Amino acid sequence: MTSLDDLLRQHGGLTTVHVERWVARGLLKPAGDANAWTFERIDVARTHLLAELTGDLGFDDETVDIVIGLLDQVHTLRGQLDLIGRAVAEQPAATRESIAAALARLGER
């Protein structure tokens, strides 16, 4: 867990106002109350991304919301595909071969 002070130290140009706005918009989800927020690793990484999108790239709030929403969707889909892949891997060889053949056939279309 990373405290708000540690998070701000990691980002020279980042302020409490930035973090508060991102929390209010639901882009960051710290634990604890506003006086003692702590951030999981995913929120620390997301803060790096948000700082880059808003600072370095100059994206406005609406564009940042869209980009983050799309990235969240990609992350969710990757997790779902991983589960499907693991479920397929647990199937008997004949079933896996049938699935592979169906994927090859469908991919030709």
Image: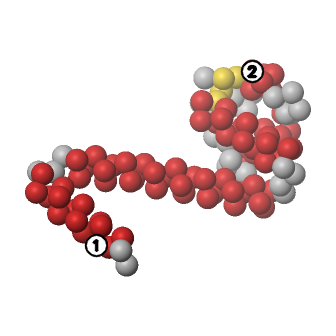
72 is higher (above) or lower (below) than 40 = below
Q: Residues within 10 Å of mark 2 (few under 14, many from 20)?
A: few
Q: Residue at x 22, y 65 (%)?
A: 101
Q: Position of residue 25 (x, y in %)?
A: 73, 51
Q: Are marks 2 and 1 in contact (CB under 8 Å)?
A: no
Q: Residue at x 57, y 52 (%)?
A: 72
Of 94 and 35, the residue lying toward us: 94
- The quarter of the picture where the C terminus appears is bottom left
Say if residue 27 shows up in the picture: yes
Check disc 1 and report its element: helix, strand or loop: helix
Q: Residue at x 61, y 58 (%)?
A: 70
Tell me which label, 2 or 1, sits earlier in the chain.
2
The residue labelled by disc 2 is: 6
Q: Amino acid at mark 1?
A: Arg
The residue labelled by disc 1 is: 105
22 is higher (above) or lower (below) than 108 = above
Q: Position of residue 58 (x, y in %)?
A: 87, 51
